[in-house]
Amino acid sequence: MTVLDTEFGLQTERLTLRRLTLEDADLMLAVWNDPAFLEHVGDRGIRTLEDAQRTLADGAFRLYEKYGYGPFRVALRDGDRPIGTCGLFRREGFDDPDIGWSVLPEHCGRGFAYEAAQAVLKFGFDDIGLTRITAFISAENTPSLGLAKKLGLRFEKMARLVGDDEDVCLYSMAHEREAI
């Protein structure tokens, strides 16, 4: 897979990925209220565009500022139609960044999450020099568990995120040069 790191973000064969802006609040409102997101990630109580803008400012924008990475808006290259998000996050109590993805229901099952996640992993390891990336996935989220394995992440242990009351699966991947 070819990933081009452009001044606008990342490009793959079918997708463009770029940092989120306040203009993406409608996309994020749809993502945060998608039934699969609500079931497997949780209800963040975001119901309005203003809530989404505030959450972007308090979350994604702070990640960009503090770490130089965060979630990307994922869009189809043909027509720049947004279809979800994929990016790197930083969870309280954990040393390594984690990858997360969400594709809106009408675009699931076409390999878009895999394509976006491959680009984000390449970006994390090759462009910003990370040595290890993790993923936190609900044990009931069969599609995401399968995607993590397909990407080459390996199950490490059950873990609990700060503020949650249930354990999730912690997957991880070390950069190839670190695994030797």
Image (cartoon, rainbow, N blue to C red):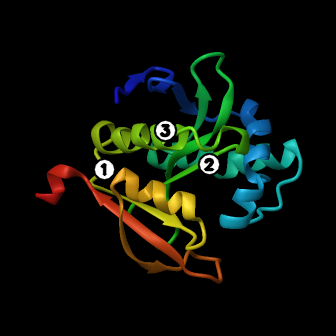
Quadrant in which residue 24 is drawn:
top right
Percent of width and height locating residue 82: 67, 30
Residue underneath mark 1: 130
Element on which disc 2 rests: strand
Label 1 sits on what residue type?
Leu
State the residue at coordinates (39%, 53%). Answer: 150
Q: Which mark is residue 116?
A: 3
Q: Residues within 10 Å of mark 1 (few under 14, many from 20)?
A: some
Q: Which mark is residue 102?
A: 2
Position of the C terminus by quadrant:
bottom left
**Nearer-N-terminus badge (3/2):** 2
Question: Considering only vertical position in the picture, is 133 above or below 155?
Answer: above
Label 2 sits on what residue type?
Ser
Percent of width and height locating residue 10: 46, 28
Q: Nearer the viewer, residue 67 or 16?
A: 16
Tell me whether circle 3 and circle 1 mark residues in contact (CB < 8 Å): no
Label 3 sits on what residue type?
Ala
